[in-house]
Amino acid sequence: MNASKVPDIIVGRLPLYLRTLKKMKSENREITSSQELGGLLGISSAQIRKDLSQFGEFGKQGTGYNIAYLIEQLQRILNVDKVWEVVIVGAGDLGHAIANYNDFINHGFQISFVYDNDPNRIGSQVGQFVVRDVQSMIEDVQAQGIRVAMLAVPGAVAQQVTDQLIEAGIRAILCYAPTSLSVPEKVRVQYIDPVLHLQHMTHYIP
Amino acid sequence: MNASKVPDIIVGRLPLYLRTLKKMKSENREITSSQELGGLLGISSAQIRKDLSQFGEFGKQGTGYNIAYLIEQLQRILNVDKVWEVVIVGAGDLGHAIANYNDFINHGFQISFVYDNDPNRIGSQVGQFVVRDVQSMIEDVQAQGIRVAMLAVPGAVAQQVTDQLIEAGIRAILCYAPTSLSVPEKVRVQYIDPVLHLQHMTHYIP
């Protein structure tokens, strides 16, 4: 199966399905349906069946989906049936918040290093991490074969740090800086920008 | 025009278009095309034309879009042709980071209050704000007629705070807590969850 043939918008919904299924499993549920998933997520059941059918046959008409099996399949499709090492660049308020977010490990990720370029921050403790000098970032990332980074630096230096991360081998960047990054095609970028979410909602407020 | 008839997925793309157009305007650009916008955003030009056509006629075949006019129209559609007051609940690392994010005001939002329930945080300074006791939240929100909130509290108390916010009149909640909120239909919720973005990207990493 060629993953790149599936529309990106569908791939983007799979983590939502996975999160919801894992919550069901934690409640000792065994079976669910596209109707139930759709109701919980505000997506039509037809859309959910269509999305999943892009990747194979995961349920039978009338019997629903086996939750544990579907979790396993989605984790495989999303490549989170293993644990990815992640670096955080930027040890300000946001870097602290991300480093202390304790839910990564249950979803396929673990923070390996936190970096900053500020001498006052280098060597300080952030959660369970000691902030490292960004000077050692390229070498660390290469040595560990790390592919995933979270960027919590000011917008003005985001592109420069991105170029270094890509040189070091990073292939996925989650960018918290309010800017657009220019990256080669082999690198994925996603943005976390509160303004986009807020504006999406105010459309609906009378 | 009945806003609720336009698919939510389309509404969700409008802030992206708006952000890109504003960047062009800041570079003194006057005209753009669906091709250019699409190239910058990784969306097909046909999709962009189709999205915009849901709300009216904003460009003419062959002459492209007037950037200033399209910005004005998108701001009107998204209801950000005015400034919304916003409260932040939770003055930990994440609350600090959000309160110090200085790009809200250029996009239709201004922080009015920051709340916490921790006596050690109440009265402390966060950016330009003094952290207020969450006990005064309902009264403040009602008195000012605030409709938008950002939730940066631990998952365990997120639902309780949400119920209070809704009681006070909040109609849009941007939730940073890794949890799902139960809200009445009149209230919009969006989630910022780094795990969803990371899993979306790892699908593509070989």
Image (cartoon, coloured by chain):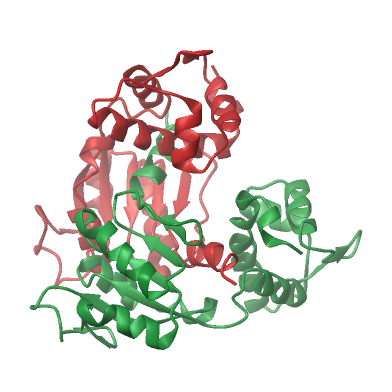
Chain colours: A green, B red
Left or right of B74, for residue A14: right
Q: Residue at x 53, y 63 (%)?
A: B201
Q: In this view, does A108 lie above or below A19?
A: below
Q: In which quarter of the image is the N terminus of chain A?
A: bottom right
Q: Which residue is drawn at 30% across and 49% down?
A: A179
Q: Residue at x 51, y 34 (%)?
A: B11
Along the line of sight, the residue nearer the viewer: A60 or B133: A60
Residue A53 visible in the picture: yes
Q: In this view, does B53 lie above or below A95?
A: above
Task: State the image coordinates of residue A64 (x, y, percent, origin top left).
Answer: 84, 64
Residue A101 visible in the picture: no
Left or right of A126, for residue A43: right
Task: State the image coordinates of residue B7 (x, y, percent, origin top left).
Answer: 60, 34
Q: Residue at x 64, y 62 (%)?
A: A17
Along the line of sight, the residue nearer the viewer: B168 or B180: B180
Task: State the image coordinates of residue A113 (x, y, percent, origin top left).
Answer: 32, 82
Q: In which quarter of the image is the C terminus of chain A?
A: top left
Task: State the image coordinates of residue A117 (x, y, percent, origin top left).
Answer: 16, 73
Along the line of sight, the residue nearer the viewer: B171 or A45: A45
